[in-house]
Image: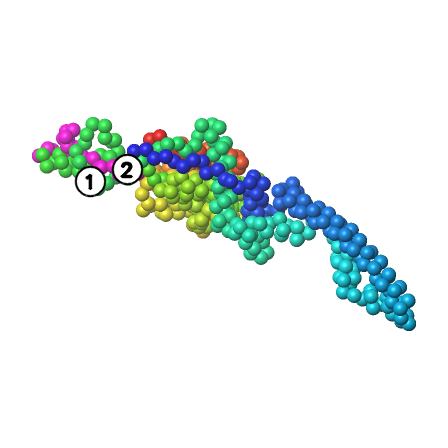
């Protein structure tokens, strides 16, 4: 049975607005604005517009004041001719009128306007996002709401899918069939074509003994297999290293953007799948995609084993095809609350990777740096056939993980 996947969720968000949301996210993560950023450009435009409007209004106000003072002088001369009042008294009374006072005060304020950037210029530029519920002010900084983060993820995903589409990668029409590593408790006789991994050794031996055979004297008709549970679901984990080095060269930012894009892809196209995000350094915590924006990057060590263990345990009772993407630029050096150095930490990572293989969890190591010890860890994992390893630059992380996810779906689904 065919079901059509909805089309690419291309964002209707204007490109410059998407860039501005991205810059707000960077500020939320503790990064400053670049001089040529969209927000800076918009704020400078706003400052120039404000200064131009102030200058034009000042010229108008000066004209109004000049005309008003001319009228008051004529009125003063008329009153002087018609009364015995002194000219000074007449002028004092006329010039003290509210309209003239207002114009002079306005001119004084307009004279203070400058083309230089002000806090008000930034607030005016960003106010639209607040009105739309995309941002909120949490003193001392502006933060994205979950709605804003979702829209940002939609924009990231749109750009990623457009790039992947040029290479022929992306969502297609799919069938609701497929199977993962999950077996039912139902047992039946073996049939030609059944995968060997579904054979129940215990039940096969019992069937042979029930026929009166000796132990080990088995025939083809003795073999029993588990029925497969057909599953197209994927439990997709992103394990994000949040140690201090990840805050350089846009690495952590790339991981956040990738998580937001994948979250949006699953929400809109594959709602049966689940995304688990674990942030780690010395400790591990599971977070929602938008919560990654608020991570305070510590100066700490790297406990990769704990991150791997946390995902394995979190996904232990979830049905589906499980895979984890360890995204890091650092070699392990910390384990269970203690600094243990690289060699001991690596041994722990290898042990945990073996647990992954036993639990039928695909492990992918995404290296964001060519650190020698990190490469040694990757080689050890590959040498033991415990997972896949690949290297990518921060700017290519989103494309790499979204593509890997879509390829995984193709493996579990018949396109």
- Residue at 75% over, 50% down: 55
Residue drawn at the location 38% of the way across and 40% of the way down: 270
Q: Nearer the viewer, residue 247 or 386?
A: 247
Residue tagged by mark 1? 186
Circle 2 — which element? loop
Q: What kind of element bears circle 1? A: strand
Q: Would residue 297 be found to the left or right of residue 55 on screen?
A: left
* Quarter of the picture holding the N terminus: top left
- N-terminal-most mark, 2 or 1: 1
Dividing the picture into quadrants, the one containing residue 223 is: top left
Quadrant in the rendering for residue 219: top left
Q: Nearer the viewer, residue 373 or 235?
A: 235
Q: Does 105 appear above or below 47?
A: below
Q: Quadrant of residue 403?
A: top left
Q: Position of residue 407 (x, y in %)?
A: 40, 32
Foreground: 365 or 54? 54
Looking at this rendering, what residue extends furthest in the bottom direction? 84
> Disc 2 vs disc 1: which is toward the camera?
2
Label 1 neighbour load within 10 Å: few <14, some 14-19, many 20+: few
Image coords of residue 87 (percent x, y):
90, 67
Q: Is residue 129 left or right of residue 193?
A: right
Q: Which residues are magenta?
A: 212-231
Query: Can residue 292 be seen in the rendering of this structure?
Result: no
Main SS class of the magenta portion in the image? loop
Residue topped by disc 2 = 230
């Amino acid at each position: 049975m065919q079901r059509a996947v909805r089309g690419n969720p291309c964002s209707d968000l204007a490109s410059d607005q998407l860039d501005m949301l991205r810059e707000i996210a960077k500020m939320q993560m503790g990064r400053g604005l670049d001089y040529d950023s969209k927000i800076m450009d918009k704020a400078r435009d706003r400052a120039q517009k404000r200064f131009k409007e102030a200058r034009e209004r000042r010229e108008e106000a000066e004209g109004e004041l000049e005309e008003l003072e001319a009228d008051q002088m004529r009125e003063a001369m008329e009153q002087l001719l018609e009364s015995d009042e002194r000219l000074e008294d007449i002028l004092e009374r006329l010039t003290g009128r509210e309209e003239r006072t207002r114009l002079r005060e306005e001119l004084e304020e307009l004279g203070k306007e400058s083309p230089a950037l002000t806090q008000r210029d930034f607030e005016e530029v960003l106010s639209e996002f607040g009105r739309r519920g995309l941002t909120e002010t949490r003193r001392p900084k502006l933060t994205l709401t979950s709605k804003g983060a979702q829209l940002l993820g939609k924009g990231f995903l749109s750009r990623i899918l457009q790039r992947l589409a040029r290479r022929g990668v992306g969502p297609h029409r799919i069938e609701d069939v497929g199977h993962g590593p999950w077996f039912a408790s139902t047992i039946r006789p073996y049939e030609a074509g059944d995968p060997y991994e579904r054979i129940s050794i215990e039940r096969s031996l019992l069937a042979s003994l029930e026929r009166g055979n000796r132990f080990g004297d088995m025939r083809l008709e003795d073999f029993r297999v588990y029925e497969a549970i057909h599953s197209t679901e994927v439990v997709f984990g992103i394990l994000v290293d949040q140690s201090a080095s990840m805050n350089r060269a846009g690495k952590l930012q790339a991981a956040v953007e990738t998580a937001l894009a994948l979250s949006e892809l699953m929400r809109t196209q594959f709602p049966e799948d689940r995304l688990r995000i674990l942030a780690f350094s010395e400790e591990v915590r599971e977070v929602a995609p938008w919560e990654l924006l608020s991570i305070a990057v510590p100066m700490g060590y790297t406990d990769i084993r704990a991150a791997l263990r946390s995902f394995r345990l979190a996904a232990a009772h979830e049905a589906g095809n499980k895979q984890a993407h360890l995204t890091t630029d650092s070699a392990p050096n910390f384990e269970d609350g203690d600094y243990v150095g690289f060699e001991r930490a690596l041994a722990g990572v290898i042990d945990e990777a073996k647990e992954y293989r036993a639990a039928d969890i695909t492990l992918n190591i995404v290296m964001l740096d060519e650190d020698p010890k990190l490469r040694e860890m990757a080689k050890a994992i590959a040498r033991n056939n415990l997972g896949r390893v690949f290297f990518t630059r921060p700017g290519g992380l989103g494309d790499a993980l979204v593509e890997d996810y879509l390829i995984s779906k193709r493996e579990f689904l018949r396109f």
